[in-house]
Amino acid sequence: MAAWGPYNFDNDDATDFAGDFMANGSEVLLLEALVAAAEEEEHIEAEIALPALAAAEIVAAWRGHPGTDFLPGLLPVVQRLASSDDEELVELAQQAVEAILKDSEPRDMWTENKQLDTWEAAQKDLLARLDAEPNP
């Protein structure tokens, strides 16, 4: 049975992505997930949206603003992340989250389950944490 919930680490796709990131801690992995969602011009499927939201959560945590559902074992790996362009990474994360908020399978699912407000609040919180000044 698949895990599924309105917060960004409440699903199997996100925890799988987090596991991959824990294994290699690569900026490239983050960029691939974020670009896939940020540059999608149509409806964003869950298999693209959910890893991108996890990647955006990792970027927010890397800037010193982890979410309340952030995976504790992931934080040490995040703190070792080296980025070639901090601003680009944050900008891509913001673009990905905004695109997913606008038109995506997770948005549709939470609308159908009448939990859109909870899911949207989690994404708006993520955007606010991405926009906040870095907290070393």
Image: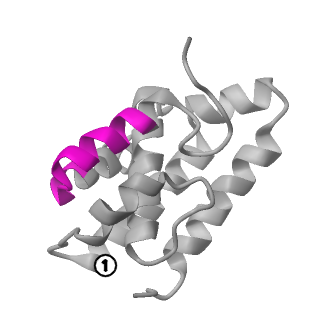
**From what the image shows, is residue 21 above or below residue 44?**
below
User: In the image, which residues are magenta?
Assistant: 15-29
Q: Is residue 135 magenta?
A: no
Q: Is 82 placed left or right of 2 in the picture?
A: left
Front residue of 120/82: it is: 82
Residue 122: x and y in percent read 67, 54
Magenta span: predominant SS is helix
Q: Is residue 24 magenta?
A: yes
User: Which residue lies at the image location 25% right of the left edge and 40% below the top edge?
Assistant: 20
Q: Where, by quadrant of the figure, is residue 28 drawn?
A: bottom left
Q: Is 52 placed left or right of 2 in the picture?
A: left
The amino acid type, in three-letter code, at marker 1 is Glu
State the SS at label 1. Answer: helix
Q: Is 103 placed left or right of 46 in the picture?
A: right
Reading the image, the residue beneath label 1 is: 87
Q: Is 111 placed left or right of 10 in the picture?
A: right
**From what the image shows, is residue 97 above or below residue 104?**
below
Residue 109: x and y in percent read 68, 26
Q: What is the number of callouts on the image? A: 1
Q: Residues within 10 Å of mark 1 (few under 14, many from 20)?
A: few
Q: Is residue 41 visible?
A: no
User: Which residue lies at the image location 45% right of the left edge and 78% below the top edge?
Assistant: 64
Residue 58: x and y in percent read 40, 59
**From what the image shows, is residue 120 above or below residue 105?**
below
Front residue of 42/38: it is: 38
